[in-house]
Amino acid sequence: MKAILAVNLEEALTVGLAAALDRRGLGARLRSVPSPKAAEALREGSYDLVVIDLAEQAVPPAGLLPALAEVSPDTCLVVLAGSAVVQAPDRPAMFDGIEVLERALPPEDLSIRIAAALQRGVKGHLENVGLAAFIQLLAIEKESCTLEVRSAGRTGTVRFVRGDLWDAQVGAKQGDEAAIEIFGWETVDVDMSGVGQQARRTITASLTYLLIEAMRRRDELVRDQPAPQTAARGEGGGDRQPSKQVTAGGHGSAGAVVGALIRELEGFIAVCLVEAATGRTVEARTMRADLDLELASAFSRESLHQVRELIGALRLSSAMEDLLFTFSDEVHLIRPSANGFFVYLVADRAQTGYPQMRAALHKLWPAFEADALSRGLPRQAEGPGAAISPVTRDR
Amino acid sequence: MPSEKQIVEVIDKIAADMSGFIAASLVDMESGLTLGAKSQRSDFDLGVASAYNSELVKQKLKIVKALNLKSTLDDILLTLSDQIHIIKMVSPNVFLYLAADRESTNLAIVRTAINKNLAGLR
C-alpha cells in the first residue's frame, strides 16, 4: 500500500484521486493536510509521494518546498497547478525535478500520471549493469531519478531530471568531469531512488558527448598500459600507433575527428568511415548497442554502387554529393569522399536534420579525408565492435 | 488507387508548386513499373530511373530488416552536383520519384510541393 501526502488538495479531488488510483489497482492511503502542516505530517509518517495543489497560485507557499526537502529530501514530489504554470516555457528553478501536472485534468488522467510518479519513486537496486546502456535508457524514458553508482570501491551520484542528465558527483568532482569519470566505470552496481528536490544543474555538455568522452578516456588508459601481446612484440613494432595520437591532430587523428563530429552534431547516433573498394571499416563509433555498423556499411556500399549505376544509366554528367535516407525516427547519410572512402552517419531525426548533418560533415570533411588516407593501411579484421566503445582499428 | 490520368495531374500540380522541376514518376515497387510520369526534358529516361530506384528502395528496406530497425522509411534523397533526386514513399509498395535542378530550387521547396500534393497519389 502506497502512502501519499496530499497538501492543500480540495476534498473532492482527494476522494476522486483515491478512487481513481484504486481502480488502477494501486490502492493508496491518502492523507490530506493544509500546506502549513505539510512538513510536520511528513516528519510524522513515511510517504512515497507528496502531491501539492497550488490552486490558482503560480508558486507554492513560501518555505513549503525547502521545509519538505529538509524533512525528507528523497520523497518524490508532484505539483498540481493551473495551465499557465504547466505551459510556461520557463518554470522557476524551484520546480526542477518536480512533476508539474495540470490541476484541471480529470482524476482518471491525474491518477495515471501519479501512478507513474509512484513507480519512479520506487527504489531499485541493480547489480553488474552496463552503465552506459542503462543511462541512455533513462534518457529515452525521460526519467527523473537519482542513481548511486558503485564500482570497485568508488561511489558516485548521478541525477536525471525528466531524462536530462542534471548533476553528477564523485569525490570532490562535480558536473561534466564527474559524469565522465563515472561513465567510464565498466560494470557497476546502481541504487536508484527518487530525484529529491532542489538539485542544481551542474551538467553543461550533452549526454552523448559525456558518454563518448568517458569511453575514449577509458580506451586511452587501456592503450597507455602496454598490453601483453604488444610487449611481446617489443618496442620495435612499427605498426603500433602512438597512444596519444588523439590530441596530436593531423595525421592519425580519427578519434579526434569523430569526437569533434559528436560535439558538432546534436542527436548523433553512429558514424563509420569505410573504404569503398573493400568495405573495410576504418573508424566506427555507435551510441546504439543494436546497430550493426559493419552490416550497415556493407549495405551502404551497395547503395553507393546503385547510385553510380543510376547516374550512368541516365547518362548524367553529375557527381554524387550524398545520399540521405529519412526514416520515421532516424536519418542516415552516406557521403563518398574523393579518395575512395565514404562516411556513413546516423542521427536522431527529432534532434537534427539534413542541413545540420551536412554542415557538420562539411566542416570536418578535410580532416576525414586526411584521416582516411593516413589510416588506409591493411589491418586485420575484427568482429563488430562492442556497443558504445570506439572501434578503433589500431593493431 | 488513382488512375494514370489523375497521377499525371497530381505530378503537374507538384511541378507547378515548385521551381526547377525536371521529371517525376509514380512507381510500383513490386513490378518496377511506372504508374504515371511526366518529364520536362526529353533526354531524361524516367523508365530507367524508376527501375534503378525501385532496386535502391528495395535494398534499403532489406537493410532495415537486417538491422532490425523499428523505423519506417519516409524518403530517400540523392544530392548530385547539379540535381536533387527525391524518392518519397507514398505507401509501402509505391513511391514518387522526382528529379529537380539544384540551380533553381532547393530541398525545402521540393519537399513542401510533394507533401502538399501527396494525398492525391494515395
Image (spheres, coloured by chain):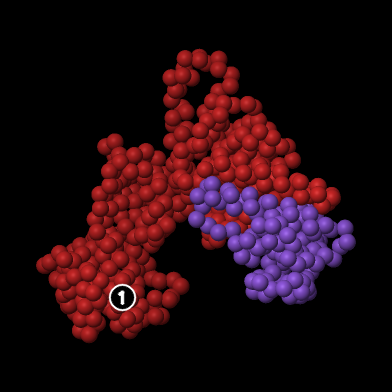
Chain colours: A red, B purple
In the rendered image, the residue lying farthest to the left is A44
**In this rendering, is residue A367 above or below A377?**
below
Q: Nearer the viewer, residue A182 or B107?
A: B107
Residue at 39% from the left image edge and 53% from the top image edge:
A137
Would residue A322 be found to the left or right of residue A177 on screen? Answer: right
Query: Where is residue B10, by image quadrant?
Result: bottom right
How many marks on residues?
1
Q: Is residue A8 left or right of residue B102?
A: left
**Secondary structure type for disc 1:** helix
Residue B54 falls in image quadrant: bottom right
Looking at numbered disc 1 in the image, what kind of residue is underneath it? Leu
Residue A271: horizontal and vertical position, in percent?
57, 45
> Which of the two residues, B90 or A23, is positioned nearer the viewer here?
B90
Residue at 21% x, 78% y is A19
Tell me what residue is drawn at x 61 percent, y 40 percent.
A298
Where is mark 1, residue-wise? A110
Front-most of A223 and A168?
A: A223
Height in image: A87 above or below A182? below
Q: Quadrant of the N terminus of chain A?
A: bottom left
Q: Is residue A301 visible?
A: yes
Q: Position of residue B94 (x, y in %)?
A: 65, 63
Residue B19 position (above or below residue B57): below
